[in-house]
Amino acid sequence: MNNKVLIVEDQYIEAKNLKVILQKAGYQVSGIARSANEALKIIEEDYPDLVLLDIYLQGKLTGIDLAKVLRDKNIAFIYLSANSNRQTLDAAKATKPYGFLVKPFREKDVLVMLDIAWYLHRQNQESIIDLKLSTASISRDDFKEIIGTSQGMSEVLNNVKIAGPSNISVLILGESGTGKELIAQCIHRISSRRRESLIIVNCAALPANLIESELFGHEKGAFTGAVDKRIGKFEQANGGTVFLDEIGELPIDLQVKLLRVLQEKEVEPIGGQKKKIDVRIIAATNRNLEDEIATGRFRMDLYYRLNVFPIVLPPLRERKEDILPLARHFVNVYASKENKVITGFTDYVVQTMLNYSWPGNVRELENLMARSVLLASGDMISSLHLPEVKPQGTIAGYNLRVKTITENERDHILSVLETCNWKIFGRGGAAELLELNANTLISRMKKLGIEKKISSKNTID
Ligand SMILES: Nc1ncnc2c1ncn2[C@@H]1O[C@H](COP(=O)(O)OP(=O)(O)OP(=O)(O)O)[C@@H](O)[C@H]1O
Ligand SMILES: [Mg+2]
């Protein structure tokens, strides 16, 4: 594999710095172009393998315009960008780059990003089967607990194989219940950190005033109520991995502190001294972080730090082939727990499962199978208790005001909360009735502007 890199960057000093970094690491630099036209000339003369591409350049054409040519020519490229606005970001993303480097970047970031880009580029060239054969020592057996052979799931697992063994930060995106936590556990398990801890932090479940001390720790007496010293989650995970679940819920002031941990690799406990730490970060969210950035709720620089290697879990309705294998798996698990023998599903049940939209994804399927196993009287699952879908629409030419999905969701959650007297956690709580993880429910409530009236029953049973 050749490794000739072209730098397209109009800032002379930045381009020079990059050139030094690349040459030191053994790359050949085929030139520095300050405009898209200059770049095109160099590409004609000396076909590079990869282009490091600034977005704003000298001349009329931008890096995004050039990216389209690079795609056609099958040349890998990574954007070099300072903070850009949403529109530029979307346009850049649409060109499917192999990575983003946010200025200012460290030498290490550049080299890791290049490694990944080569890998992804190669992956693009090879068929999925070839890739399966070539992917180092990790095999499908390493992900035995992950059910699913759909194209969408195979892509996810390929990405897990690529990112897993490295130390790179991974951002797992996907709707609620798609398996984000499961994937995070897999990544940790196939990494060199597997013998150290995987510490899971749910950013949505921590009370705002405690998050900092939870994450970074505090010294005894650092604030009223700090009776003892606390070791923060990052320090607990030293040498291992921190999984920051629901990262979209992290308050903005803590986002700044997290960014510092990522950049400087050090934590500062409240009232204490800075300490060097070595942790790998895996983050997950069911929010669209780009929308959060656009509305000022999420910092763009943190997003880029986390988004080094995104893994997107497709919703279950987009990988229908996985529904039955998952359903069988869960039936086996719950039947053996209940000491029942269940051999399969009736055709009606199979069809119903395939046609259903699974808004709660794999978790909803798992809960439904658990219930169906309990209720089954014979050796087949012959009925399903799916939530009722109420018909909506127009009546004879009258346009009815149709409630939006969000309004419906809000009303439904509110009515369930009222039913269980605002109990969220535990048996008979709203989370159980809604078949949602309690933390997911809390984050949805926040998102929908539902004020929590925490009752004394809100303890985990
Ligand atoms: N592909 C899969 N194979 C087997 N089990 C799965 C798969 N995907 C998810 N699950 C199971 O479904 C349940 C939900 O998965 P998980 O908690 O990882 O989802 P999540 O995306 O983190 O959800 P949320 O956004 O609500 O936190 C778990 O019990 C998990 O083990
Ligand atoms: Mg989760």
Image: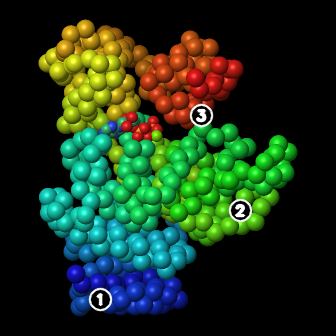
Q: Quadrant of residue 130?
A: bottom left
Instruction: Residue type at mark 1: give it.
Output: Ile
Which mark's residue is nearer the viewer, 3 or 1? 3
First-in-chain label (2 vs 1)? 1
* Residue at disc 1, secondary structure: helix
Residue 268: give its label: 2
Q: Residues within 10 Å of mark 1 (few under 14, many from 20)?
A: some
Q: Earlier in the sequence, mark 2 or mark 3?
A: 2
Q: Quadrant of the C terminus?
A: top right
Q: CA distance from mark 2 to mark 1?
A: 48 Å
- Residue 99 to residue 382: above or below: below
Q: Nearer the viewer, mark 2 or mark 3?
A: 2
Q: Residues within 10 Å of mark 3 (few under 14, many from 20)?
A: some
Q: Position of residue 338 (x, y in %)?
A: 33, 19
Q: Which quadrant of the render holds ligand 1?
A: top left
Instruction: Say left or right for 309 vs 293.
Output: left
Under circle 2, the secondary element is loop
Left or right: where does residue 191 sit relative to residue 282?
Answer: left
**Distance from the alpha carbon under mark 2 to that under mark 3:** 29 Å
Amino acid type at circle 3 is: Lys
Element carrying mark 3 = helix
What residue would you read off at disc 1? 42
Amino acid bearing label 2: Glu
Which residue corresponds to the image point at 57% horizontal and 32% vertical from the top-left? Answer: 442
Eye-nearest disc, 2 or 1: 2
Write the residue at 14% across / 18% down.
347
Task: Check contact, mark 2 vs mark 1: CB within 8 A.
Answer: no
Q: Residues within 10 Å of mark 2 (few under 14, many from 20)?
A: many
Q: How many marks?
A: 3
